[in-house]
Image: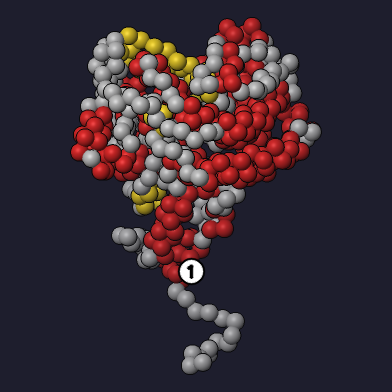
């Protein structure tokens, strides 16, 4: 109706960037890395009731296979170097989600041993408030991350070595 | 001439089966463990130090986040310690709701334990099943306190508010269906040859050793020691409830698994008795020195507002002295030791976390075993790093 299909019914046209972004956002593989209370809600999100698998989100136990790290819990000064190492082991492109008040800002633990927000060390893409955030909140955060991934520019070019991927600001 | 030497292997803090951020440094002879050194402190948040700068009411939310699988049990331990210090009497309805909620918490903690323990050993279906039931308990938490995990529901002298009307029906429905769910887990595990091979004879610790290490909770009862604080040093009206304390015989991982499963069935019975016992009445003690005023007074009268403001900002002064209160948390004896210098904040708050003490036995239990068996031992100890590191 009004739209012509010069290539026939079974062919759709898209940009290569959109194709790459779509495949990336449809298979976010986060690290299995629980730090504290939020990790339990992260597990609950991945388990039967909320079921992250339907978003193509499958937890991986190795940073080499992951493209997203969910900082789920309080980051202590003793833990920070470990998180940095894990983050550096992840291949590009990679995204960071700060889940919960502690990961966002230190939360109620304004003490000598707690890092006041993971953004002091890692570039955070999505902040999810809550102590701990509900599974629905984590799902919403992950969907926000998917939106953000869809806005990436030059995803295909950077994948074949032409220039840098330009991440969107929001 | 070939020489052999041991290998040092670092396990954690980023490891899917260390239940958080536990780090173990293993010495291996081939695949056999010869030495285990636990390194803790990766989740040290300074809760005890923070508590020295909070009024007695303000400390309560911190206790939620110690053992985050059993927030209400932590609340109860701390609140009972403060009530002991202040000599506050708790109304019967509040006491009964506390027992119902802590037993539901025990169910929740054991559900996450069986989920993770089975997942670590390779039975993934149990994880999916157990989190389905946990969701029902979380909905009950949400119904009464508004929060799913960190409930912060108890208050010194009672509860923050009365439970809504649908509470009884919801809890009743849940504990009616729970034994059937437990049968499902047992169907998946108790006769499963892989599960039996992985758990029978694994992580053996004798009753004497368990007592010497100070192990408490299901890990102690699995070794055949008949000790449960709910019965042997009763608190919060537990002496009025009929329940069995299961004990194991063979001191191994399988016996601890059976003890926890029976405990879950007993918890359902305690909740049922609690629901039968629930009578209308006040849920907060009539003690204006210590307790918050009812919300109607706060919103409708200046005296109530001032009263609320005073308790919320200043708290209450506690008499000089020290108290210790232990409760049977899902993981063992959780103790709160408060030293008061007469001010509105504790001079020192010491927490005796069960996981911290139970973890010490890990070398005894897993020495000479394979790495894969160590994973089963970590699962059976049921540790939570939030309360180990505090």
Query: Considering only vertical position in the picture, is A110 above or below B28?
Result: below
Q: Is residue B29 left or right of residue B49?
A: right
Image quarter for residue B220? top right
Q: Which residue appears at 53% of the width and 24% of the height?
A: B329
Label 1 resides on the chain identified as A
Q: Position of residue B32 (x, y in %)?
A: 66, 20
Quadrant for residue A169, please give it.
bottom left
- Colour basis: secondary structure
Q: Quadrant of the C terminus of chain A?
A: bottom left
Residue pictured at 42% horizontal, 12% vertical: B324
Q: Residues within 10 Å of mark 1 (few under 14, many from 20)?
A: some
* Residue visible at 31% across and 31% down in the picture: B292
Quarter of the image where one finds residue B197: top right
Q: Decide if residue A73 is in sight here.
A: no
Residue B166 in view here: yes
Camera-nearest residue between A8 and B71: B71
- Residue B341 percent location from the top left of the image: 26, 11
Query: Which residue is at the far front?
Result: B280
Indicate the position of residue B136 as horizontal and vertical percent values. Answer: 57, 44
In this rendering, the answer to whether A128 lies above or below B286 is below
Residue placed at 22% from the left, 30% from the top? B310
Q: Nearer the viewer, residue A94 or B18?
A: B18
Q: Which residue is mark 1?
A: A19
Q: Is residue B209 left or right of residue A38?
A: right
Q: Is residue B367 above or below residue A125?
A: above
Q: Secondary structure at mark 1?
A: helix
Locate residue B6 relative to residue A15 in the image: left or right. right
- Residue B171 versus residue B54 in the image, above or below: below
Nearer to the camera, B128 or B277: B277
**Residue B142 x %, y %:** 47, 44
């Amino acid at each position: 109706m009004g739209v012509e299909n010069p290539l026939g019914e079974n062919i759709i046209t898209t940009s290569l960037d959109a194709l790459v972004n779509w495949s990336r956002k449809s298979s976010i593989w986060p690290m299995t890395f629980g730090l504290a209370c939020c990790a339990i809600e992260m597990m609950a999100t991945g388990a039967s009731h909320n079921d992250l698998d339907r978003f193509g989100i499958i937890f991986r136990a190795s940073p080499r296979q992951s493209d997203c790290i969910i900082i789920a819990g309080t980051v202590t000064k003793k833990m920070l170097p470990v998180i940095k190492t894990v983050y550096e082991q992840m291949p590009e492109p990679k995204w960071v989600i700060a889940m919960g008040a502690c990961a966002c800002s230190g939360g109620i633990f304004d003490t000598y041993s707690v890092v006041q927000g993971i953004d002091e060390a890692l570039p955070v893409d999505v902040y999810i408030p809550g102590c701990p955030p509900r599974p629905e909140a984590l799902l919403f955060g992950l969907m926000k991350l998917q939106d953000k991934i869809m806005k990436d520019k030059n995803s295909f070019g950077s994948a074949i070595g032409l220039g840098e991927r330009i991440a969107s600001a929001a | 001439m070939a020489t052999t030497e041991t290998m040092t292997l670092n396990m954690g803090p980023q490891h899917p089966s260390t239940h958080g951020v536990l780090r173990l440094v293993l010495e291996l002879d081939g695949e056999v463990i010869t030495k285990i050194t636990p390194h803790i402190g990766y989740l040290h948040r300074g809760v005890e130090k923070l508590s020295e700068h909070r009024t007695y009411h303000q400390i309560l939310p911190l206790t939620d986040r110690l053992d985050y699988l059993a927030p209400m049990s932590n609340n109860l331990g701390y609140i009972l310690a403060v009530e002991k210090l202040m000599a506050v009497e708790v109304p019967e309805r509040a006491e009964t709701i506390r027992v119902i909620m802590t037993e539901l918490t025990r169910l929740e903690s054991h559900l996450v334990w069986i989920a993770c323990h089975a997942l670590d050993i390779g039975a993934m279906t149990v994880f999916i099943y157990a989190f389905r039931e946990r969701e029902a308990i979380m909905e009950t938490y949400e119904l009464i306190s508004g929060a799913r995990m960190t409930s912060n529901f108890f208050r010194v002298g009672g509860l923050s508010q009365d439970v809504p009307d649908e509470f009884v029906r919801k809890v009743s429905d849940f504990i009616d269906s729970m034994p059937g769910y437990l049968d499902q887990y047992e169907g998946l595990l108790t006769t499963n040859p892989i599960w039996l091979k992985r758990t029978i004879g694994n992580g053996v610790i004798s009753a004497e050793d368990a007592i010497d290490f100070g192990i408490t909770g299901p890990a102690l009862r699995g070794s055949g020691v008949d000790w449960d604080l709910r019965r042997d040093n009763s608190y919060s009206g537990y002496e009025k409830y009929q329940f069995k304390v299961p004990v194991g015989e063979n001191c191994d991982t399988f016996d601890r698994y059976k003890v926890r499963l029976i405990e879950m069935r007993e918890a359902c019975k305690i909740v049922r008795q609690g629901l039968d016992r629930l009578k209308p009445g006040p849920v907060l003690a009539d003690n204006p020195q210590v307790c918050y005023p009812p919300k109607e007074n706060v919103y409708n009268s200046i005296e109530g507002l001032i009263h609320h403001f005073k308790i919320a900002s200043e708290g209450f002064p506690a008499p000089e002295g020290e108290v210790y209160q232990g409760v049977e948390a899902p993981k063992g004896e959780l103790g709160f030791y408060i030293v008061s210098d007469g001010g509105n904040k504790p001079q020192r708050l010491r927490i005796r976390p069960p996981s911290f003490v139970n973890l010490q036995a890990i070398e005894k239990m897993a020495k000479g075993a394979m790495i894969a068996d160590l994973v089963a031992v970590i699962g059976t100890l049921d540790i939570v790093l939030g309360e180990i590191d505090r």
